[in-house]
Amino acid sequence: MQILLATDADWIVDDVVAALGGDGVSFIVCREGRVVSDQVAEHSPDVVITDLQIGSMGGMAVAMALRLDESSGAVPYVPVLMLLDRAADVHLARRSGADGWLVKPLNPLQLKRATAAIIAGGTYPGRPPEPAADPVAELDVEVTGDAVGEAAGELDGGAGGASNPAEEEPATAG
């Protein structure tokens, strides 16, 4: 297995190599995000692991560039695992086309599971289910005129819909 690791942080290189290293595993370390696509084209790694923060080009831009280059035929499809700084960054990973993501600090067991899952064609963590095409159609609620009138009455303080909150009320200035 060949892993392309895009980061400029030595501690991330150390953690990833310690967790995933072994017989038959080789690493290519890119310290500049803008050369990741070139390295993918040259080496065809099994997976790209990218840090969200890389000096010249962040992980989101790296993943998006890989997906664009893949769509044009410049590079083959390679699964991307993004290493995030905080849980709030998950939306960045999703939007960029990453296949999986982990929030730092890195857990070696999670890193192994995530890498295995995306190499096998899955995602990590699993993506939420797609929203229903028409969420209103899935509701099993029948709304009648009486229900609307009763709801309006409750809003008016229990008057049973007798007053209309949209009516004008005279007011004096002064």
Image (cartoon, rainbow, N blue to C red):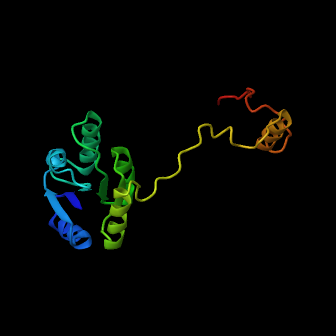
The C terminus - image quarter? top right
Residue 136, percent across and down? Answer: 66, 38
Residue 98, percent across and down? Answer: 34, 50
**Residue sitting nearer the eye, 76 or 141:** 76
Taking 32 as reference, is 161 above or below it?
Answer: above
Taking 61 as reference, is 19 above or below it?
Answer: below
> Can see residue 143?
yes
Taking 127 as reference, is 105 above or below it?
Answer: below
The residue located at (36%, 68%) in the rendering is: 110
**Residue sitting nearer the eye, 64 or 42:** 42
Taking 89 as reference, is 140 above or below it?
Answer: above
**Residue sitting nearer the eye, 56 or 64:** 64
Determine which quarter of the picture holds residue 156: top right
Q: Residue furthest front?
A: 24
The residue located at (15%, 59%) in the rendering is: 28
Determine which quarter of the picture holds residue 49: bottom left
Residue 37, percent across and down? Answer: 19, 45
The N terminus - image quarter? bottom left
Left/right placement of residue 94 relative to residue 18 reads right
The residue located at (83%, 44%) in the rendering is: 158
> Can see residue 162?
no
Left/right placement of residue 149 relative to residue 76 reads right
Number of dots carrying numbers: 0
**Residue sitting nearer the eye, 73 or 88:** 73
Residue 36, percent across and down? Answer: 17, 48
The residue located at (19%, 53%) in the rendering is: 54
Determine which quarter of the picture holds residue 143: top right
